[in-house]
Image (cartoon, helix red, strand yellow):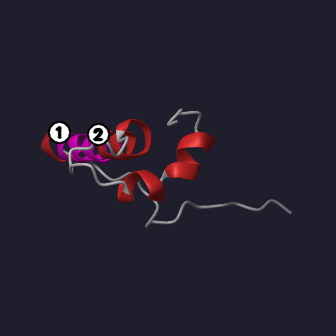
Amino acid sequence: MATSYAPRSGLGAVPLSVPTTMLWLAGTTVLALLAYYFIGIDQGAVSIFGSDMHVHEFVHDARHFLGFPCH
C-alpha cells in the first residue's frame, strides 16, 4: 500500500520585498550591536550613561561566561 503525502497549502514560502528584508536586517543589526555594547563594552566607569554601574552589574556574569574581561 503506497502512501502519498501532499503538501499543505499553508506551508508555502513567504515572499519578502527588498525594502522589507532591508528593514529586518537593519533592525536585527541595531539590536545585535546594542546587545554587544551592553554585554561586551559597557564598563560602568566609561558608560554612556555616566558612572552608573547598574548595567555592568546586571550583565556581569554573562560577560565572564562569554569571555569578556571586566576587572
Q: Position of residue 33 (x, y in %)?
A: 31, 39
Q: Is residue 52 above or below residue 71?
A: below
Q: Around disc 1, counting alpha carbons within 10 Å, would you say few (fewer than 14), some (14 to 19), or many (20 or more)?
A: few
Q: Position of residue 38 (x, y in %)?
A: 36, 46
Query: What residue sits 43% from the left and 67% below the top?
Result: 10
SS at mark 1? helix
Q: In the picture, residue 67 is in which quadrant? A: top right
Q: Amino acid at mark 1?
A: Val
SS at mark 2? helix
For the residues labelled 1 and 2, the Cα–Cα distance comes to: 16 Å
Q: Which secondary structure class fits the magenta region best?
A: helix
- The residue closer to the viewer here, 46 or 58, is 46
Query: What residue sits 37% from the left and 41% below the top?
Result: 43
Q: In the picture, residue 53 is in which quadrant? A: bottom left
- The residue closer to the viewer here, 31 or 6, is 31
| Magenta span includes 25 | yes
- The residue closer to the viewer here, 26 or 12, is 26
Q: Is residue 35 left or right of residue 65?
A: left
Which residue carries the number 2 mark?
29
The magenta segment = 21-32
